[in-house]
Amino acid sequence: MRLRLGRILKIDIFMHWTFVLVPIVLFYNWRFQMGLDWLTILAMSGLVAVAFICVLMHEYGHALAARHLGIRTRDIIITPIGGLARLERMPRNPFHELYVTIAGPMVNLVLALLVFLLIASLGVNWMPPEEAPIKEQWLPIVMWLNLALFVFNLVPAFPMDGGRILRSMLAFVFPYETATRIAVLVGRLMALVFVVLGTYWQQYSLVFIGCFVFFAASYELRQFRKVTRQEQAVG
């Protein structure tokens, strides 16, 4: 089940139903566990909204790059762990896949740079102390958030962006199915690393991401083989 949020640049935007749990969990944590005042909660809510917009812009990076290659985007779905631009198909040309995939993280890198320039022009401390008022931390948090999205999405854990970049680079040397299998194997290994580190650090969101990546990689491989068989049957 999903909620339609609107349509921008001829692409429908949906929110997965599980996303409604995010504000509930955050509000409970901020108000009853951390004891934040209402003004701080409002500022933190604004940061969550900005994070939502940054993730959406990331997905539009993929979608518009794909459109440039003549590939339509069915829709964009926002989930608690990120966004998903559902393309009609992934390009089989390694250059094209690299172009479409890298477009998303590059949006976050550009956003981080723009916010950094704004911070510099305003004379704001880009690394404020933790005890600083939220208004002094707001812009630096947005900058670091986009840098984190840029770096995290480059982790070679297929089917994340980094994993797709890895596959596209492998596809310059190997057949596409071989490149996919190698990228899936690397993705599974990275997923196990997420689970182990998340368990050791007691960061269970990382454990959840690891489990998601592991099963998503397996699903992507099955889908790739299914599409390949269909294409061979048509051919």
Image: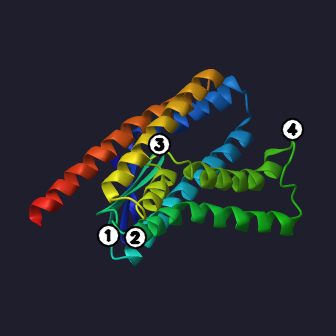
Q: Residue 183's x, y, as percent?
A: 43, 48
CB contact under 8 Å: marks 3 and 4: no
Q: Residue 34's x, y, as percent?
A: 71, 27
> Which amino acid type is shown beneath numbered disc 1?
Arg
Which comes before the other along the chain, label 3 or label 4? 4
Q: Quadrant of the N terminus?
A: top left
- What residue is disc 3 on? 186
Distance from disc 3 to disc 4, alpha carbons, whole Å, reads 40 Å
- What residue is disc 2 on? 66
CB contact under 8 Å: marks 4 and 1: no
Q: Residue 113's x, y, as percent?
A: 72, 66
- What residue is disc 4 on? 131
Nearest the viewer among 126 and 37 is 126
CB contact under 8 Å: marks 2 and 1: yes
- What residue is disc 1 on? 72
Distance from disc 2 to disc 1, alpha carbons, whole Å, reads 7 Å
